[in-house]
Image: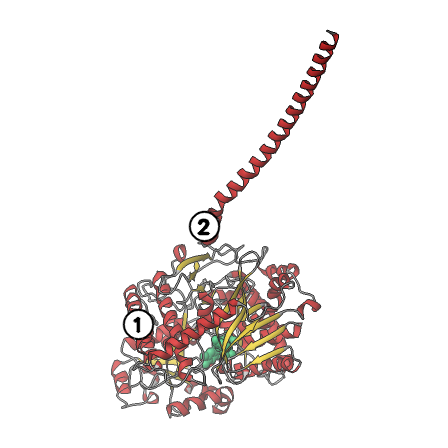
Amino acid sequence: MAKKEEILDAAKKVASKAAQAAKEVAEVAVEKAAEVAKEVVKEAAKVAEAPKAEAKKAEPAKVITPKMAKIPEGPLEKKWTNYKDHQKLVNPANKRKLDVIVVGTGLAGASAAASLAEMGFNVLNFCIQDSPRRAHSIAAQGGINAAKNYQNDGDSVYRLYYDTIKGGDYRAREANVYRLAEVSNNIIDQCVAQGVPFAREYGGLLDNRSFGGAQVSRTFYAKGQTGQQLLLGAYSALSRQIGKGKVKMYTRYEMLDIVMIKDEQGEPRARGIIARNLVTGRIERFFAHAVVVGSGGYGNTFFLSTNAMASNGSAAMQMYRHGAYFANPCYAQIHPTCIPKHGDFQSKLTLMSESLRNDGRIWVPKKLEDAKKLQAGEIKGRDIPEEDRDYYLERRYPAFGNLVPRDVASRAAKERCDAGYGVNNTGLAVFLDFSDAIKRLGKDVVAQKYGNLFQMYEKIVDENPYENPMMIFPAIHYTMGGIWVDYELQTSVKGLFCIGEANFSDHGANRLGASALMQGLADGYFVLPYTIQNYLADQIGVPRMSTDRPEFEEAEKAVEAKIEKLMSIQGTESVDTIHKRLGLVMWDFVGMGRTAESLKTAIAKIDEIKKDFWSNVYIPGKADALNNELEKALRLADFIEIGRLMALDALNREESCGGHFREEFQTEEGEALRQDDKFSYVACWKYTGEDCEPELIKEPLDYEFTERKTRNYKS
Ligand SMILES: Cc1cc2nc3c(=O)[nH]c(=O)nc-3n(C[C@H](O)[C@H](O)[C@H](O)COP(=O)(O)OP(=O)(O)OC[C@H]3O[C@@H](n4cnc5c(N)ncnc54)[C@H](O)[C@@H]3O)c2cc1C
C-alpha cells in the first residue's frame, strides 16, 4: 500500500514538474510566437508601406522650399559667411583622389576648372572650340560690374544687390544675388592679380563707366574687349594647371550626354559624360566623381542672335532629360543696341556695346514725314535738326535717360518703330548719336573710349558713325533662364552642377549690363570651389569607375543611335533652313511682345518644325569624321525643344516682368505689369518623357529682405 502511495506521490511530482515545464515551454513559445508575430506584422507593415514610399519617391515635390534650395539661415549679409563656415571640406590628400569634369571654357568654365585644379582636384575640361580662348565669352565687350565704389559715387554691396534684384524685376533669389554682389569685389582683385589690363584713370586707379539700371559707375572695362581680356586671364590660370597636369584639356570635343550611375541607395548620380571628338567623329566615354556644366546660353534658339555660332542649348537639354529642372526658360534678353538685320542670308547679329549708351543719345524723328524720308534713303540722320529729334528715352525716363535697363530700352525702340518712326529702309532701327559727345569731349576722346566699336560698325554698315548717327535695333542677346540650381549651384540631379549663363542664376527676369561676366566669374572662382566640396566630401570613398560599365555602354549606344537616325534621314532641307524657320517663329511669336494667342501659335508651329526636322533634314558627309552639319543638326534638335519650352513657360507666366512682356499685362503707359500675388516664383520644368508635356514645379520667391516695387526709372 505504502509503495502504491509512494508511486502515486512520485507520479504527482513528475506530473507537476511536467506541467511546470510545459507551462514554461508554452510561455516561451507564446513569447517567441509573439516576437515572431511582431516581426511578421512589422514586415507586413513595411511591405504595405513600400508602394506608398515608392509612390512618394516617384511623386515630385511640387514646391521647392528654401531648405530644399539649401539657402542658409540668418541675415542676408551673413548667409554666405555662415555657409562657408559650416560647409564640409575635402582635405588635400582626398582632393587628389577625386575627378571633376568641367564642360565649357567660357569665363564660368575656365575659372572653375582652373580654381578646382589649383585646389588639388583632377579636372577634365571640355570645349567645342579649338582653344579654350575661343569660347563665346571672348565676345563680351562692355565690362564687368563690381561694388568697389572707386568713384566714390555712393556704391556699396547692398546697392549692387538692390540694383540687380530690381533690374531682374524681383524674380531672382535674394540670397544668391546678395552673394554675387558680395564676391564681385574679389573678382576684380583676382583679375588684376592675373594681369587683366583694365582701363585706368590718369592717376593709375582702375576706371569705371556706367551701365544700364544703375545710377553709379561700377563697370570695370578693358576698352570694348573686356570679355577677351578676362578670358585671357582665366586662360592663363587654366594653362598653368594644364601645364602641371592637373587639368586635362579636351578641345574640339562636344558632350552629347551625361552618364548617370545609381549609388548604393539607388539614387542616380552624374558620374561622367559621353563626348564626340569633333575632328574624328569618335564617340568617347569619360568618368568623374562630379560633372560641372558651364555651357553658356541658348539665345541661338532664335537663329539670329548676338551669340557665337557654336553657342547652344544642348548641354542644358541633356541635363534636363536626366531630371535637372529647366527654370524660367521664357526669360530671354533682347538687347537694345545691335546692328539692325540687313538681309535674309545673314547668320549673325552684331552687338554694339551698352557702354555706348554712356555717351550716345538715342532718338527717332519727331515727324513721321522725316521718318519716311529716312526710310526711303532721301535724307540722313544728321540732316534732321535738333528740334525735330525725339530723344524718347530721355523724355520717358528722365531719371535714367539712355541708361534704362535693356528690356525697357528695347521695348521703347519697338514702340517707336511700330508707330512708324523707324529710321532705316526696313523701318526697324533707331539712332544712337554721338554728335553731342563729340562736341563735348572731342573726337579723340570718343575714339579712345569706343574706337574699336566704331570701327566695327563702319566695317559692317559701311557708314562713318563719327559723321552720321549709328542705327541700332534690339536683338536676342542673353538668356536669364537655364538649368535650376540650388544655393550650392547643384542641379536637381546629384553630382551635376551648372554655372555661368547656363544656369537660371541671379538675374531674375532681366540681366543688367556687365553682370553676366560678374556672375560667370563669381560662380567659377568664388562660389563653386566652395560649394562643390560639400558634395565631394561624401564621395571620397567612391573609387574611380570603369567606363566599361553598362551605364556608359548604354549612354554611348543611345548617342550613336540618335546620330544614326539623323544621318539616315537624307531629306531635302538644310539644317540652317529649318533653324531659320524656327528663329522666325521665335522672333515673331515668342519675341519682344508675347500674347496667349501668339504663344499657342508658336507651340503649334514648333511642333510642325520638329516633325519636318526629323523627317526632312539633310546632313551631308559622314558621322565618323569632321562634320559641321551633323554638329549643327544635333544642336538644332535641342533648340527646337527649347523653343517649345520657352513658349510654354511664357504662356504659363500670365504677367509681364523684365524681358518677358505679355502684351495683355501692361500699365496704361505701356510698362510691364507684374502679378506678384500669382507669379512670384521660379518656374521649374521637369522632363517627363519625349513628346510629353513637362511638369511645372515652383520655387516661391518670398522676399524677406527686399520690398518689391513697381520698377521706376522715371524719377
Ligand atoms: C556680343 C556680346 C557681348 C557681351 N558683352 C558683355 C559684357 O560686356 N558684360 C557682361 O557682363 N556680359 C556680356 N555678355 C554676356 C556674356 O558674354 C556671357 O553671358 C558670358 O560670357 C557667358 O559665359 P559662360 O562661361 O557662361 O559661357 P560661354 O562663354 O558661352 O562658354 C560656353 C563654353 O561651353 C562650351 N560648350 C558648350 N556646349 C558644349 C558641349 N556640349 N560640349 C562641350 N563644350 C561645350 C563652349 O565650347 C564654351 O567653351 C555679352 C554677350 C555677347 C553675345
Which residue corresponds to mark 2? 55
* Image spot of residue 391 (x, y percent): 37, 78
Q: Amino acid at mark 2?
A: Ala
Q: Is residue 474 visible?
A: no
* Image spot of residue 500 (x, y percent): 51, 72
Q: Secondary structure at mark 1?
A: helix
Q: Residue at x 48, y 43 (%)?
A: 48
- Work out how far the residue at label 1 is from the one at label 2, CA to CA, in angstroms: 34 Å
- The quadrant holding residue 698 is bottom left
The disc label shown at residue 30, or none: none
Q: Residue furthest top?
A: 1
Is the residue indicated by label 2 positioned so its CB lies within 8 Å of ligand 1? no
Q: Is residue 589 visible?
A: yes
Which residue corresponds to mark 1? 611
Viewer-closest of 241 and 27 = 27
* Image spot of residue 279 (x, y percent): 49, 85
Q: Amino acid at mark 1?
A: Lys
As drawn, 538 above or below 214: above
Q: Residue at x 41, y 68 (%)?
A: 331
Q: Secondary structure at mark 2?
A: helix
**Quadrant of the frame with the C terminus:** bottom left
Is the residue indicated by label 1 positioned so its CB lies within 8 Å of ligand 1? no
**Quadrant of the frame with the N terminus:** top right
Viewer-closest of 29 and 99 = 29
- Dot 1 or dot 2, earlier in sequence: 2
* Image spot of residue 528 (x, y percent): 58, 68
